[in-house]
Amino acid sequence: MDVANQLVAGGQFRVIKEPLGFIKLLEWLFSIFAFATCGSYSGQFSLSVDCTSNRNDSNLNIKVDFEYPFKLHQEYFEAPTCIGGATTKVFLSGDYSSSAEFFVTVAVFAFLYALGALGVYIFLQNKYRENNKGPMIDCIVTAVFTFLWLVSSSAWAKGLSDVKLATDPENLIRDEITACDKESKNICQELKEPIMSGLNTSVVFGFLNCIIWLGNVWFVFKETGWTAPFVKAPPPAQEKQPAPESFSQGQGFSQQDSYAQQGGYQPDYYAQQPDYNQQGYSQGGYTQQGAPTSFSNQM
């Protein structure tokens, strides 16, 4: 407990909260679900054959078991012929072990790799990021598993469709049992269909794993640094240019104006302006210092 507390306090498990570690944890969990729902499957169906000519030859509860890896051509059951108490062996058709075993194998190896990657993320983070070798290898392996999930899930989806047809009691009654021909008056019927919900779930988990691993490719790819050559560097900061000389002089005049208005020193700039205080106004006209005398007399 002390070691676990130290690891948590040191922040080594913090990587699980980040997208890289969290998605890898999802990959680990969904890989378990994928191979568990497929590899541990066992199913059963049942049917009945009622011989109308001789009831003693009838078999009203024929049970047929099958399981992973779905080598159905090895599974058979005894069906009555309704002739003198004789029976015949009826074999199921098809061998779908290749697609099922391929799917489970990919799921198991994906589970092991995701578990190992999580251990590296948590305990060997420095080694993982050293020279970017860890992210590069991780990105390549993740992309390969994405492709394998797509192929294996597609193959198993097709295989599961064929398994359903091969284990359908109605198909067996119509095509495989001679006592159930249309010409005979024997009564053959389906009693129980196999439950395929677990196998349907395995296909769903297979394609979910494909999506999750594909999404993780992007997060691992960003850790590799391969995007650095394509990222534009920010433009350099521009240095401040000195203000123009005319602007400086204008600013100086403005400062002198404000100082002069406050009753301070007046520069020659103001001394050169005409003295408008010496102008006078009167009704009907105006007089100005230095105006002609004749004009003043006329007013």
Image: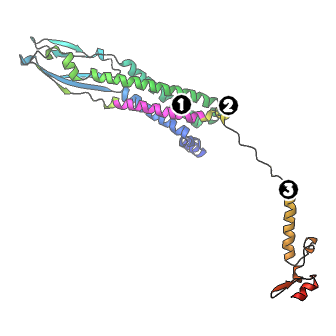
Residue where numbered disc 3 is placed:
244
- Region rendered in magenta: 200-221
Secondary structure type for disc 2 = helix
Task: Using the numbered discs, state the Cα–Cα distance from disc 2 to disc 3 in whole angstroms.
Answer: 52 Å
The amino acid type found where label 3 is placed reads: Pro
Residue 130: image location, x then y, percent:
66, 32
- Toward which corner of the image does residue 229 lie, by quadrant? top right
**Residue closest to the eye, 76 or 266:** 266
Q: Position of residue 95 (x, y in %)?
A: 33, 16
Residue at 84% x, 84% y is 286
- Up/down of 19 relative to 85, above or below: below
Residue type at mark 2?
Answer: Asn
- In the rendered view, would you say 38 is above or below 222? above
- Which dot, 2 or 3, sits closer to the camera? 3
* Above-or-below relation of 163 to 279: above
Q: CB of mark 2 within 8 Å of CB of mark 3?
A: no
- From the image, tell me which residue sits under label 1: 116
Is residue 87 shown in magenta?
Answer: no
> Mark 2, residues whose alpha carbon is within 10 Å: few (<14), some, or many (≥20)?
few
At 18% from the left and 12% from the top, the residue drawn is: 88
> Horizontally, is 132 left or right of 180 in the view?
right
Give the CA separation, mark 1 to mark 3. 67 Å
